Image: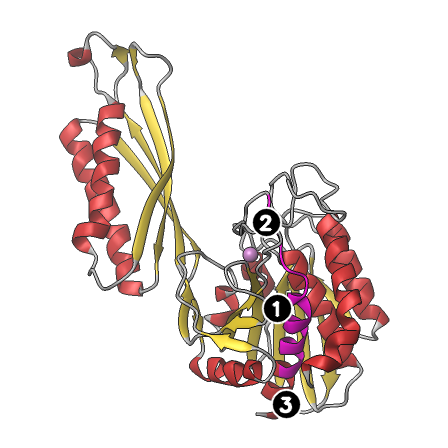
């Protein structure tokens, strides 16, 4: 289908997006959004199942053995919207600042168009909750969201790319996301008598500095990695040596060997430096998201399909994370970045910013891609 044929759905997709935008809901609380999604699909004659508390899965069954899936995420962020638009968030402290409102709206209209067309094969629509840090995708997978599915794709609107462009690349596009929490216990006392104490603040300062040497000294300089300590907490007053310091941070990587190397080095450095300073350390290390790695064949098909309707560019791997990886590590997956740059104010506000917004003209490009990609995958 040509881009012009989608024009007539433009008002509807914008209207849906604005409605979701005005009523943002956080992860696993998407009751209203999920209700609208379910009713919309049911009205199209698509049966639905509820999964992962607020997730919705619907499927068009037109026979044949092929089954593909398209995924949208539905959750918003705990951010107070600062945009001055008629469809501004009505909920203080909550905002669709990543564009998941757009993802949900586009996939609904895609489902509508596909439900009116004739084709052989099965298309599953996955509306998942809680992408932002709560790994809703993992629960969707556990509850059967991709059982029997041959391949899956999803879009993310992208503030860094102008409308009419889409970024599609094979291989890793988003990073492994780890979280570490470290507690350093010393022995508190008077700030004037350090010799009677074991100072966890001095020890933590050395430990945090040495963590930065992992990327600069242990990781192959041709590979990518980030270690960020994002929070530190310790002490109560200027003249008291604290009992305890806690800090936490994130590690971002693409390669599994680098992933393992960094975890090992963090443990070694924390243990050795703690011993040297006489403090006690406790380390918690969690894997939050796997890297999102695009299937080569799907990326090739995606680029070919997209080139008929818009400009296709390469996606530089980004150190951000996505729980789309939960699907893409089990079945062939493609995660593409839809240009939706909003230049109204001349400044581009990034994702997760209180003034983030998208160019709504991008929505119809997204629908056009989803519909055409679904067709192409069922044909292949
Ligand atoms: Ni997002």
**Marks 1 and 3: in contact by CB < 8 Å?**
no
- Mainly helix, strand or loop, the magenta region? helix
Q: Residue tagged by mark 2?
A: 356
Note whether ligand 1 is within 8 Å of mark 1.
Answer: no
**First-in-chain label (2 vs 3):** 3
Depth check: give the residue in front, 353 or 214: 353
Q: Residue tagged by mark 1?
A: 71
Picture layout, residue 226 above or below residue 363: above
Question: Which image quadrant shows ligand 1?
Answer: bottom right
Query: Which circle, 2 or 3, is nearer the viewer?
Result: 2
State the residue at coordinates (67%, 57%). 101
Q: Is residue 44 left or right of residue 344?
A: right
Q: In the rendering, at what x and y percent does residue 214 appear?
A: 21, 49
Which picture quadrant has residue 138? bottom right
State the residue at coordinates (78%, 60%). 15
Q: Secondary structure at mark 3?
A: loop
Kindly report the distance in space between the C-alpha atoms of the residues bearing marks 2 and 3.
Answer: 42 Å
Q: Secondary structure at mark 2?
A: loop
- Residue 363 falls within the magenta-colored stretch: yes
Quarter the C terminus occupies: bottom right
Q: Residue tagged by mark 3?
A: 65
Q: Is residue 166 left or right of residue 91?
A: left
**First-in-chain label (1 vs 2):** 1
Note whether ligand 1 is within 8 Å of mark 3.
Answer: no
Q: In the rendering, at what x and y percent does residue 361 appear?
A: 67, 65
């Amino acid at each position: 289908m040509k881009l012009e044929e989608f024009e007539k759905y433009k008002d509807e997709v914008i209207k849906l997006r604005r409605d979701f935008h005005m009523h943002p809901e956080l992860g696993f609380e998407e009751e209203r959004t999920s209700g609208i999604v379910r009713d919309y699909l049911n009205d199209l004659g698509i049966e639905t199942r509820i999964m992962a508390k607020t997730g919705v899965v619907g499927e068009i069954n037109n026979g044949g053995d092929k089954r593909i899936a398209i995924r949208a995420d539905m959750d918003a962020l705990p951010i107070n919207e600062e945009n001055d638009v008629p469809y501004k968030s009505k909920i203080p402290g909550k905002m669709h600042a990543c564009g998941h409102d757009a993802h949900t709206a586009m996939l609904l209209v895609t489902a509508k168009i596909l439900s009116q067309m004739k084709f052989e094969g099965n298309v599953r629509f996955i509306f998942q909750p809680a992408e932002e840090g709560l790994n809703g995708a993992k629960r969707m997978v556990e509850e059967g969201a991709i059982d029997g599915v041959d391949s899956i794709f999803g879009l993310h609107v992208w503030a860094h790319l102008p409308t009419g462009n889409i970024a599609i690349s094979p291989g890793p596009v988003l990073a492994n996301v780890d979280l570490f929490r470290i507690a350093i216990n010393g022995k508190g006392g008077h700030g004037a008598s350090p010799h009677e104490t074991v100072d966890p603040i001095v020890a933590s300062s050395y430990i945090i500095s040495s963590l930065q040497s992992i990327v600069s000294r242990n990781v192959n300089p041709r590979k990518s990695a980030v270690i960020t300590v994002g929070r530190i907490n310790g002490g109560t007053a200027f003249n008291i040596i604290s009992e305890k310091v806690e800090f936490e941070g994130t590690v971002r990587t693409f390669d599994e060997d680098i992933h393992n190397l960094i975890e090992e080095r963090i443990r070694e450095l924390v243990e050795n430096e703690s011993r040297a300073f006489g403090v006690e350390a406790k380390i918690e290390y969690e894997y939050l998201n796997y890297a999102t790695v695009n299937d080569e064949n799907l990326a090739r098909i995606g680029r070919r399909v997209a080139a008929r309707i818009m400009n296709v560019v390469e996606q530089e791997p980004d150190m951000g994370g996505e729980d789309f990886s939960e699907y893409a590590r089990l079945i062939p997956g493609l995660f593409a970045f839809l240009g939706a740059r909003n230049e109204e104010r001349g400044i581009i506000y990034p994702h997760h910013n209180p003034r983030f917004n998208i160019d709504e003209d991008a929505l119809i490009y997204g629908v056009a891609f989803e519909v055409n990609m679904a067709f192409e995958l069922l044909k292949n």
